[in-house]
Image (cartoon, helix red, strand yellow):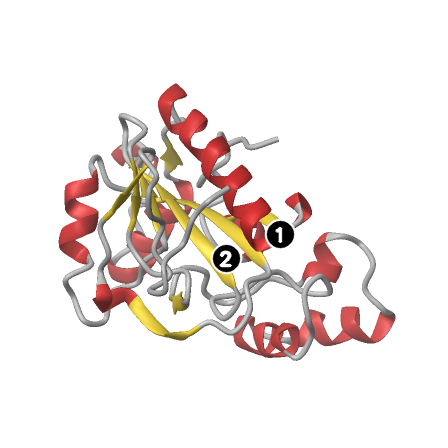
C-alpha cells in the first residue's frame, strides 16, 4: 500500500517520483471520492512542468510520462483544477427524474454543473473539489487542414479543431503505470473502481481523451 507523509506526498516508493508544483494546488481537499484520468495534449512531461509554473495553471496530482515514469505533481491533501464543469451523471446513466430531464433540456453547461454540485457522489461525478487527477502524456492529433470548414474563424475554428482532434493511444508502459497507480490509490483512499472516470465522461472534453486508457 502507498505510504503518504504529512504533506500528502508518496514516500518510500520507487515507482513514484516527487515533482510537486505548488502553483497548481487550490486549497485543502476535505474528502477524496474519485479519480479522473486525463491526457495532456503534449509530447513530453517537460512542457507540462513548464506550464505548472504559471500561478493560474490547471493541473493534476500525478503525471505519467511516455516511458511510464509516474510523477506526483500535487499533494493528495489539496485540490487542483483538472475537471471543469460536470456533465449530468443521471442523464449519462439514464436514471434522471423527469424534473431533471426538463431542467437540463433548457439549461446551459454552468447551470447543469451547479445543479450537479448540489448532489453528492455517486449521484454526481467526482469534481475538482473531491477527486485525484492523473495526467498521461499524449498529443491530440488535429484534423487535416482541408477538412476544417473555411467559414470558421478565430475561436470557432479553434473549438472545431479541439473537438475533432484525436488523441494518440496510451502506450504499454503508461498503461502499466496507470494500472499500478489506480490500484494503489483506490486501495489507500478506499475509492471504488466505479468512481474512476475518463475526463470526457465527467466533463465537456474531446471524447477521445484517455479513450485508450485502461485500469480494470
Task: Count numbered badges in the picture.
Answer: 2
Q: Position of residue 69 (x, y in %)?
A: 29, 32
Whether residue 200 is situated above or below residue 53 in the rendered picture:
above
Residue at mark 2 to residue at mark 1: CA–CA distance: 23 Å
Which quarter shows the C terminus? top right
Find residue 51 and report its image quarter: bottom left
Left or right? Give the position of 106 relative to 80: right
Left or right of residue 21, residue 168 in this image: right
Q: Is residue 56 visible?
A: yes
Q: Residue at x 29, y 46 (%)?
A: 150
Left or right: 189, with 168 as reference point: right
Q: Position of residue 36 (x, y in %)?
A: 50, 51
184 on left or right of 57: right
Name the element at disc 1: loop
Seen from the viewer's position, the closer of residues 117 and 61 is 61
Give the image quarter of residue 154.
bottom left
Residue 56 picture location, percent across and down: 23, 71
The residue sitting at 46% across, 60% down in the picture is 83
Circles 2, 1 touching at the beta carbon (< 8 Å): no
- The residue tagged with tag 2: helix, strand or loop? loop
Tell me what residue is drawn at x 24 percent, y 41 percent. 42
User: In this rendering, does residue 197 appear at all?
Assistant: no
Q: Nearer the viewer, residue 93 or 131?
A: 131
- The residue carrying mark 1 is 191
Q: Which mark is residue 204?
A: 2
Amino acid at each position: 500500500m502507498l505510504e503518504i507523509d504529512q504533506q500528502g506526498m508518496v514516500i518510500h516508493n520507487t515507482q513514484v517520483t516527487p515533482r510537486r508544483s505548488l502553483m497548481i494546488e487550490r486549497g485543502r481537499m476535505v474528502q477524496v471520492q474519485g479519480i479522473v484520468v486525463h491526457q495532456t495534449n503534449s509530447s513530453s512531461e517537460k512542457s507540462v512542468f513548464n506550464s505548472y509554473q504559471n500561478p493560474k495553471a490547471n493541473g493534476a496530482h500525478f503525471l505519467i510520462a511516455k516511458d511510464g515514469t509516474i510523477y506526483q505533481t500535487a499533494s493528495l491533501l489539496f485540490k487542483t483544477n483538472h475537471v471543469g464543469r460536470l456533465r449530468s451523471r443521471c442523464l449519462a446513466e439514464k436514471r434522471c427524474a423527469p424534473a431533471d430531464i426538463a431542467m437540463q433540456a433548457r439549461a446551459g453547461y454552468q447551470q447543469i454543473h451547479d445543479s450537479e454540485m448540489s448532489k453528492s457522489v455517486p449521484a454526481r461525478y467526482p469534481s475538482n473539489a473531491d477527486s485525484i487527477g492523473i495526467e498521461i502524456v499524449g498529443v491530440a492529433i488535429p484534423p487535416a487542414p482541408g477538412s476544417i470548414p473555411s467559414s470558421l474563424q478565430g475561436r470557432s475554428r479553434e473549438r472545431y479543431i479541439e473537438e475533432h482532434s484525436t488523441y494518440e493511444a496510451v502506450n504499454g508502459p503508461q498503461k502499466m503505470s496507470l494500472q499500478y497507480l489506480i490500484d494503489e490509490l483506490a486501495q489507500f483512499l478506499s475509492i471504488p473502481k466505479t468512481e474512476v472516470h475518463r475526463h470526457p465522461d465527467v466533463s465537456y472534453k474531446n471524447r477521445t481523451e484517455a479513450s485508450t486508457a485502461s485500469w480494470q
